[in-house]
Amino acid sequence: MMRLFKAELYQLSTRLAPKIWLLVGLLLGAAIPIIFYLGTWLEEGVRPIIQVLPAETLIYFAFIPLMTSTAIFLLIGLGNTAYHDETRNRTLINTVSTGHSRVKIYLTKYLSSLFLAFCFLFIAISGFAIAGSMIFNGGISIYYEILFMETVLSYLPIWLMYLALFQIIYFFSTSNALMNLTILGIIALPLILQLLSLRFEFIEMIEPYIFTQLSPDNPIMIQGVDFTPWLALIYFSIFMFIGISLFKRREIK
């Protein structure tokens, strides 16, 4: 499996698209404090930025949107980049024909997607920290860095879940049109559930437990314990089991 993973990393390193994604991550991370600084400067005039730009405000302004809907769109792009249309390029059949276990192939592809996503996150954080240190005259305090890392860790199970779900779509969509339509359906699912909940009460009851509704900002409390990350990991396990089971039985042409 390590050999397969190294081969996946080599493919990522030789292609242009992953490099573009990492550059986007750097620019995105740096742009968030810069844009917020410019907006504050235009609004407040030439007063020292430290007086008008509290670090806590910047932290929440920058990363709360990225943890929710924006992060899902980024995972779609990163996962698709790692998958690289294996079916159309007929590279998947070559990998299977070498005799490697299909379970290992599926897990390796997931790990390569996860590796690219973590690289993107690390570079985005680096860009944010560099730009933030310029704005805050020495950097953001350790308190806010810990606050950010706690936020990242709280969303990590949800990211893992979505990446596992998108991998099923990448592996089993017979065309790009079907893949895009399926992803759009997932994105639109929260709106559909809200509309259905107006008509059916049981939808409103189960809505918080559906995977598209999971968020640390709206914790599912059971006996005083936040069950949200555990439910996300349960969904992750289900999606991985479904994906591996289908891939083991799939005829690859």
Image (spheres, rainbow, N blue to C red):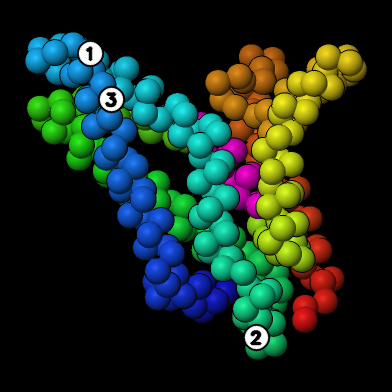
How far is mark 3 from mark 1, CA to CA?
Answer: 11 Å
Amino acid identity at mark 3: Phe
> x, y (%) of residue 41?
18, 19
Q: Which residues are magenta?
A: 154-166
Residue situated in front as seen by the camera: 124 or 146 = 124
What amino acid type should be assigned to the residue bearing mark 1?
Glu
- Residue 158 lies in the magenta stretch: yes
Name the kind of residue labelled 2 in the image: Asn
Could you tell me if the residues under marks 3 and 1 are in contact, i.e. CB atoms within 8 Å?
A: no
Instruction: Read off the residue under disc 1.
Output: 43
Question: Residue 92 in the image: x percent, y percent?
Answer: 66, 78
Rendered residue at 27%/40% (across/down)? 30
Q: Between marks 3 and 2, how big is the CA–CA gap?
A: 48 Å
According to the picture, the residue beneath numbered tag 2 turns out to be 94
Circle 1 SS class: helix
Q: Nearer the viewer, residue 71 or 161?
A: 71
Which residue corresponds to mark 3? 36
